[in-house]
Image (spheres, grey):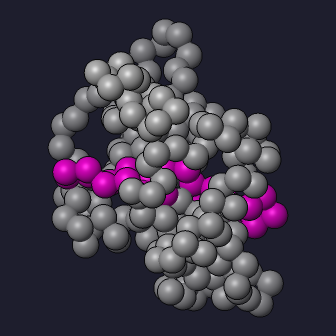
Amino acid sequence: MTTVKQSIGGEALTTKLAMKMEDSMQAFAVRAACFIGELDVPYSEEFDGHDFGATHVIAYVGDEPVGAVRVRWFQSFAMPERLAVIQRFRGNAIGQLLLERCRKLAETRGCNMLYVQVLPNDVKYWEKQGWRRLVAEDGGAPKRIVAMVRAVDPSKPLPDVEAPESVVLRPEPQLDASGLPLGTASN
């Protein structure tokens, strides 16, 4: 567990990587409270096949899990996703703490860039944290998802990269009742 020289209500603020199923369940509980409970995101959209292949970072105030982020790993970049902070703990820089932990973790794994997909209403939050849009807005139709990047090592410039505002990196296949991908010769 990483302790930060910050406390909330006299309790230490810490972060921890999910190493056990109990840890993962705490991250999932934070996400469920924020996304399903507050934003009415359907369960099927919030939890997907990427959850068990990703790294989860959890923020705690004392022993209480109050924030979480999921990180997926690609060849040269890391993708923080599902950043969530319990409503009553927002405004305490917990999101920034989780993202900084992701950045440091990505640095140890040799990644040169962090990549996120955010909602248009959240772009200003991410820009305040040092992220930039991959593609400038063109003034056309409103975007559903905005792709943003940040260098893992702030002293090195980001490579020139362009991508559409909405990118599907690895869609999960639809499965039949036996667990095989639909459209395969077996079904």
At horizontal 46% and vertical 45% (from top left) the residue drawn is 49
**Residue 83 drawn above or below residue 173:** below
* Bounds of the magenta segment: 70-97
Asked if the magenta segment contains residue 157, the reply would be no
**Residue 83 drawn above or below residue 119:** below
Q: Position of residue 40 (x, y in %)?
A: 76, 37
Residue 63 position by quadrant: bottom right
At horizontal 75% and vertical 55% (from top left) the residue drawn is 33
At horizontal 57% and vertical 54% (from top left) the residue drawn is 83
176 or 136: nearer the viewer: 176
How many marks on residues?
0
**Can residue 97 be seen from the camera position used here?**
no
Q: Position of residue 45 (x, y in %)?
A: 60, 37
The image quadrant where one finds the C terminus is: top left
Asked if the magenta segment contains residue 91, the reply would be yes
21 or 1: nearer the viewer: 21
